[in-house]
Amino acid sequence: MAASHICDCCQSCMSRIPYATLIATLMCLLGVGIFCGTMYRGASLTVIMMDQVFHLHLIWIEAIQMIFVIIAAGMAALGFMILFVGFLATGATRYKVYRAWRSRVGGRISCAVFMGITYLLNFVWILILCFLVIVTFIYTMFWNMCSSVERSLSCIDLTQFHFMFPPNTKQEDMKICDKYEIKAFCKDGVENAEVMFILATLAALLVILSLV
């Protein structure tokens, strides 16, 4: 009898777990964690590279780094709230919590609100993914330029990327010829930052999948 009672309790507990929501929450937390960590590191490498090579101080990137921290905290809080609602709306818990008419209406409204927030966040993360694809593509082009320079021992000409520099930047400042600057640009900057942005792109894709 005791073993049967324990088995029934285990089955009851297992039936109350929203497995899909739990898996989605874990995917979301993992994706957001990787995204924020890699983007923070990638932005830091970009700031150092721009300072050492082009002598440009990008103060606004520090604000973006703080935004990454806020995104991580917000997405984590939202993930746990959705998981909590999922527990309330699964199995026997649903019948105990949402007995009254007002409770059922409140539950439906809360689910609708979270669904709306989820769709909105999904759209935002798709935009972030598109942005990261562009950034990763640009850094891949930079890395290809670095590879060609290593073979030809010439300068790295970034004049075609003039839109990425301040308006008053001279064209000669967009060319990298010094060996130290080439190393700071290619090895220390582009090579490491590209890996970070690739991981951030994959993490954003993971977050989007968790929100679907």
Image (cartoon, rainbow, N blue to C red):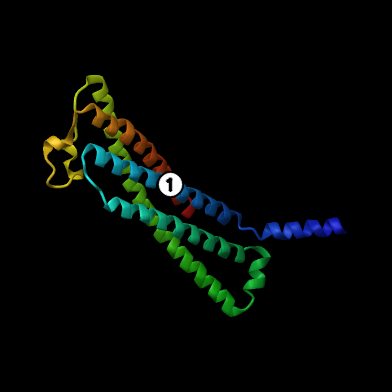
State left or right for residue 36 relative to residue 99: left
Q: Name the residue type under label 1.
A: Gly
The residue tagged with tag 1: helix, strand or loop?
helix
Which picture quadrant has residue 186? top left
Across and down, in percent, residue 13 comes to 70, 59
Q: Nearer the viewer, residue 45 or 9?
A: 45
Which picture quadrant has residue 162? top left
State left or right for residue 65 relative to residue 118: left
Decide: is 92 above or below 126: below
* Number of callouts: 1
| Residue 61 visible to the viewer | yes
Q: Nearer the viewer, residue 78 or 60?
A: 60
Query: Which quadrant of the rendered structure holds the N terminus?
Result: bottom right
Other residues around mark 1 within 10 Å, as few (<14) / some (14–19) / many (≥20): some
Q: Residue at x 25, y 29 (%)?
A: 180
| Residue 145 visible to the viewer | no
Q: Nearer the viewer, residue 48 or 193?
A: 48
Across and down, in percent, residue 75 comes to 46, 58
Q: Residue at x 79, y 56 (%)?
A: 7
Extreme-right residue of the structure: 1
Q: Residue at x 53, y 54 (%)?
A: 25
Across and down, in percent, residue 65 comes to 35, 52
Which residue is disc 1 drawn over?
A: 37
Which picture quadrant has residue 9? bottom right
Decide: is 136 above or below 123: above
Across and down, in percent, residue 89 comes to 60, 65
